[in-house]
Each structure stands twice: as structure tokens, then as C-alpha cells.
Amino acid sequence: MEFTNEIIGLLMIGAMLFAIFVGFPISFTLVFLGVVFGAWGFGIKLTVTLMQFQFYGSQMEQTLAAVPLFVFMGFMMEKAGLMERLFAAIQMMLARMRGSLYLAVLFVSVIFGAATGIVGASVTILGIMAATTMNRSGYDVRLAAGTITAGGTLGILIPPSIMLVVMGPVLEIPVTDLFAAAIMPGILMAGLYVIYTLGRCWINPALGPPLPEDMIPEDRSLIWKELFAGLVPPTILIAFALGSILSGWATPTEGAGMGAFGSVLLSMGYRKFTISGLYDALIKTLEISVLILFLVAASNFFGAVFSRLGTPTMITELLLAMDLSASMVVILILAMVFILGWPLEWVPIVLIILPILAPVLIELNVDMLWFAILVAVCLQTAWLSPPVALSAYFLKGVVPSWDLKDIYLGMMQFMVIQIIGLSLVFIFPAIATWLPRWIYGG
């Protein structure tokens, strides 16, 4: 039986999804399939040449140099213990208010989300910080688990998000535009979480009672001092790093370098700097950066082979022939991204699936900046969708006393809120596009 190159491309995608679902390492799977199907479609010589160009070209992408710097900044901020101080101060300040710990968790997650875009780290640290106090104060386990996991996923969306740094070159959108576009949706999602948690506590005070009297310090000046120490330095650092990027004073890589250097100075200022801590942060940064950057190179090669086979053009023509509206095509793509987000991390979805579908959207004149933010919110939602939601396992790992079923039920409440937020960004594109157009014009 004779296979056309387009059909070979479809078989290639099927083999990729099967291999990833079975559990093969994603990067090596992509390289292996690229070589095998490329050799089948247009010969081994062209395939190897394509691999050389794609690997070299992707690693020379200057914007991606920001990835290890932002990761390092996040780990050093974590080492400095800033989040613990900030959480403790807000918790004491709002001690007599219903649901104060939910508010403290969400406030800290916004700050920490801006410091590091690593969901696993955010959920783990929030779980360690908040779960014990929430248990002791008689907080509802489901709502507490949902707040921690949902707050932890904000790091995917709130700039400087690593996912947005990677997504920019893939969709050919300036990373500065993506950062500006993600700010309002990030604030919107955090606001919806706050309204939901405090609204539930107002209706049923048992879900988030005030803290016990023995946990409330009498010295208010001590609370203000802790709040200042925990909030002001990291906020200034993030504002400088992000502000310099958004204002055009620095490229994303230069801004990330400033943030990384500032995080080292902060850890010194808080007397938390140690050589062993620095070494640990560097090793973790190396592990995550190599994982992401090798995956970028592998998926670039895979995508190049796939494009050379002509399958994306066939898919584009097929979707256009269906005569669907642009909105309907976007909804179908978001539904697919959401479903793929259950078993897959954001990296293969952003690097493999989006480039395949981007030509259809460009043909339909869809605003790619708006679409990119929709995908980011959609992938954030996927982190909260059982049964594969990784956030649940991160939280269960640090709070073993919480039942996985309760964590799932808590997350599902926030998944509904996520879908409401996603719908708002879909219906009102200006939520995502207003700020970048105001800053950069156009």
C-alpha cells in the first residue's frame, strides 16, 4: 500500500501521542520519531540535515536564555524564605477575619507566581506553608486543597511565566506582548478565586473560621514589620525585572538576568545565602532548564519533519473546507488543548500541537496574542482536572493526611471557576489585548 507524505505525518502524530501516553521520555521519543518518519517520507540525508539546522537554530534563540535565569530567580527567592514570612504576616494581620488563610494563600501565590513559573514548586511550598495552620484552625479540607492547588497554577499565567517565554518564539509573538497580555487575565483569575473562597466563608463561616486566639500576636508593629520584610523586597525585585522588560528598557533575557542577580542579593540580605543553597539552586535550575531546552530542540525538529511532510497544510485545508467560523475553530482547539493537558505537560502542547494548528488560525485572521493567552488559561485549567492533575500529587506529597479524593473535589470547584475565567477572556478579548495595545500601541 502506498502512503502519501501527508498520511505519514498523521501516522507520526499518532505514534507520538501513543508513545507519550505509554510513558516513553518525550524528548527522545520526538527525536526518534522525527528520524524514522522523516527517513520514510523524504530520505535519511535530508532528515539528518534538518535535525542539525533545527537543533542549532532553536538553541541560538536568544529569548530562551531567559528560561534558566527565571528558574534560578524562583529557586533563590524560595531559599530566601520570603514566601513564608509574607504568608505568616498576612495570616496574622487578617487573623480575625473569616477565610483569612484562603486570602493569604492566594495573595502569596500571586507574588510567588511572579517569582517563578514552576507550578510544582508553587503548590509544594504553599502546601508546606499553609496546610498545617489550616488544619489547626479547622478549615475545610476540600476548599483549602482547592485554594492551594489553584493558587499554585497561577505561576503558569502570571508573568514572567516560563511558558510564555517558550510560547513567544513558537507563535512568533514578542514575549513582551505576551507578558503584558497575561497580567489582566492573571489578576482576573486570582480575583475570581478570592470572591469564591470569601463568598463561601461568608455563607458558611465553618469553612474558614478566624484563627485561634493563641495564634494571634498582640504586638501589631511586629506584624507590619514582617509584612514589610516579606512583601516589599520581592515586589521591588519583580517590578524591576518585569517592568524593565515591559517598558522596553531590557530584553526578556536581560530582565531575567537582573531578576536572578537581585534574588541572590535578596537571599544575602535576609542572611539565608549559603554556598550549599546556591549549589542546590544551580543544580535544580540546570535540571529544569536542560529538560525544557532539549525538549524545545527535539520538538522543533519533530515539527520541521512534520511540516516537510505537508500534513499541516492538509489539516489547514481540511478545517477551512469545513466552513466553520473562527470562534468555532478556536473553541475546538481549546477543547483539544484542555483534553491533552490532562496527561501531558504544557511543554509538548505548546511546542508540538500549537505550531500544527497556528496556520489555520492565521488563515482565519484570529488575533494570535488573544489566542496565546486563551491557551495559557486553558493549560492552567488542565492542571486542575482529575484524574491526571499533577497539582493533586504535589499537594498530597507534602500533606499526606489529606485524602486524595478531597483534594480532587476541592480542585474541581476551582476548575469550574477557571472555565468561567476562560469564558470571560474568550467573550471579552480586550481583557488580554487592552494592556499590550495601550503600552505598545497598535
Image: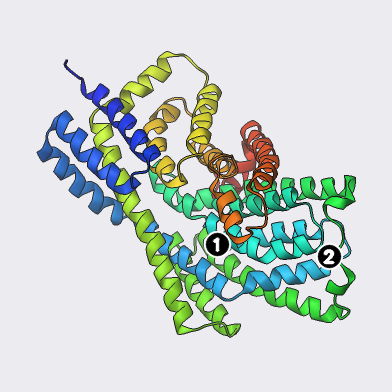
Residue beneath the point at 48% across and 78% down: 277
Report x, y in % for residue 246.
Answer: 54, 58
Report x, y in % for residue 217.
Answer: 85, 77
Crowding around mark 2 (Cα neighbors within 10 Å: few <14, some 14 to 19, many 20+) is some
Which amino acid does the dot numbered 1 rest on? Leu
Tag 1's secondary structure?
helix
Residue beneath the point at 54% across and 55% down: 119
- Of residues 185 and 146, the one drawn nearer to the viewer in this rendering: 146
Side of 63 relative to 329 (left or right) = left
Which amino acid does the dot numbered 2 rest on? Leu
Tag 2's secondary structure?
loop
State the CA–CA distance, disc 2 to disc 1: 29 Å
Residue highlighted by disc 1: 242
Q: Are marks 2 and 1 in contact (CB under 8 Å)?
A: no
Residue highlighted by disc 2: 94
Chosen colour scheme: rainbow
Residue 86, located in which quarter of the rendered image? Answer: bottom right
- Of residues 282 and 392, the one drawn nearer to the viewer in this rendering: 392
- Of residues 196 and 253, the one drawn nearer to the viewer in this rendering: 196
Q: Give residue 343's mark.
A: none
